[in-house]
């Protein structure tokens, strides 16, 4: 028999004990769903790309163009490490962050990772008309995205929790699906403080 976790009380938001780190490819909905999730849990929302831009005083495309991807990855790791040391909240990461072994390790130690999984067609529909992603400034951006998917999905698969990003699902529905999935995962982690606790 499958053991189901006890339902979370619906009257108040559960208390978050570790930062929920949203990972996944560009277009998965990490930022939009993450904002709704943070509201639901009554915690702060942070976006690692926005934090890097603030720290560098440049946009992500400017950092890539002027300093290169390696410098961006280094800044990304340092920013995420700093954010993980702060009060538990919801952290949306850039699509490449979880691929970096050191960043992944920090997330594993200090946070609970949630992969927003989506298929190529959905991701492409969401990113195709939005400039500002340097990796997609290529002659065939769909092929780049497809290649990133092939290379990164086996790595994202090591996230603690996986939630499928459904076409047409509201941010609210996705946020609630994440809460339920994290709660279910908590129930399988004997001896570890649950990420979500009843207040
Ligand atoms: C990147 C994804 C972007 C941003 C940068 C690199 C990646 O973030 O960090 O352009 O390597 O996939 P989003 O996933 O939020 O678009």
Image (cartoon, rainbow, N blue to C red):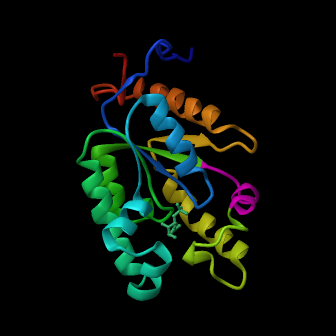
The image quadrant that residue 122 belongs to is bottom right
Magenta residues: mostly which secondary structure? Answer: helix
193 displayed left or right of 124: left
In the rendered image, residue 183 lying in the magenta stretch gets the answer no
In the rendered image, residue 120 lying in the magenta stretch gets the answer yes
Residue lying at 38% horizontally and 85% vertically, measured from the top left = 67
34 displayed left or right of 172: left
The image quadrant that residue 53 belongs to is bottom left
Estimate the x, y position of residue 107 in percent, counting from the top left.
34, 51
Estimate the x, y position of residue 48 in percent, counting from the top left.
40, 58
Residue sitting nearer the eye, 178 or 134: 134
In the image, residue 62 sits, relative to residue 172, either above or below, namely below
Residue lying at 49% horizontally and 29% vertically, measured from the top left = 40
Residue lying at 62% horizontally and 39% vertically, measured from the top left = 171
In the image, residue 110 sits, relative to residue 27, either above or below, namely above
In the image, residue 132 sits, relative to residue 30, either above or below, namely below
85 displayed left or right of 164: left
Estimate the x, y position of residue 187 in percent, counting from the top left.
42, 23
Residue lying at 74% horizontally and 45% vertically, measured from the top left = 167
Residue sitting nearer the eye, 136 or 103: 136
**Image quadrant in which the C terminus is located:** top left
> Which region is colored magenta?
117-126
**Image quadrant in which the N terminus is located:** top right
73 displayed left or right of 24: left
Numbered circles on residues, count: 0
Estimate the x, y position of residue 45 in percent, counting from the top left.
41, 44
């Amino acid at each position: 028999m499958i053991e189901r976790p006890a339902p979370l009380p619906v009257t108040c938001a559960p208390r978050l004990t570790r930062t929920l780190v949203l990972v996944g490819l560009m277009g998965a909905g990490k930022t939009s769903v993450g904002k709704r999730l943070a509201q639901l849990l009554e915690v702060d929302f942070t976006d690692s790309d926005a934090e890097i831009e603030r720290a560098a005083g440049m946009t992500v495309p400017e950092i890539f163009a002027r300093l290169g991807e390696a410098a961006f990855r280094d800044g990304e790791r340092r920013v995420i490490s700093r954010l993980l040391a702060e009060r538990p909240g919801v952290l949306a990461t850039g699509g490449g962050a979880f691929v970096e072994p050191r960043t992944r390790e920090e997330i594993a130690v200090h946070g609970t990772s949630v992969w927003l999984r989506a298929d190529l067609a959905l991701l492409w529909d969401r990113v195709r008309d939005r400039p500002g992603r340097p990796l997609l400034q290529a002659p065939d951006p769909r092929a780049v995205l497809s290649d990133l998917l092939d290379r990164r999905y086996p790595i994202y698969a090591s996230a603690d929790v996986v939630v499928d990003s459904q076409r047409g699902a509201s941010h609210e529905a996705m946020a609630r699906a994440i809460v339920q999935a994290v709660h279910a995962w908590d129930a399988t982690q004997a001896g570890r403080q649950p990420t979500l606790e009843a207040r």
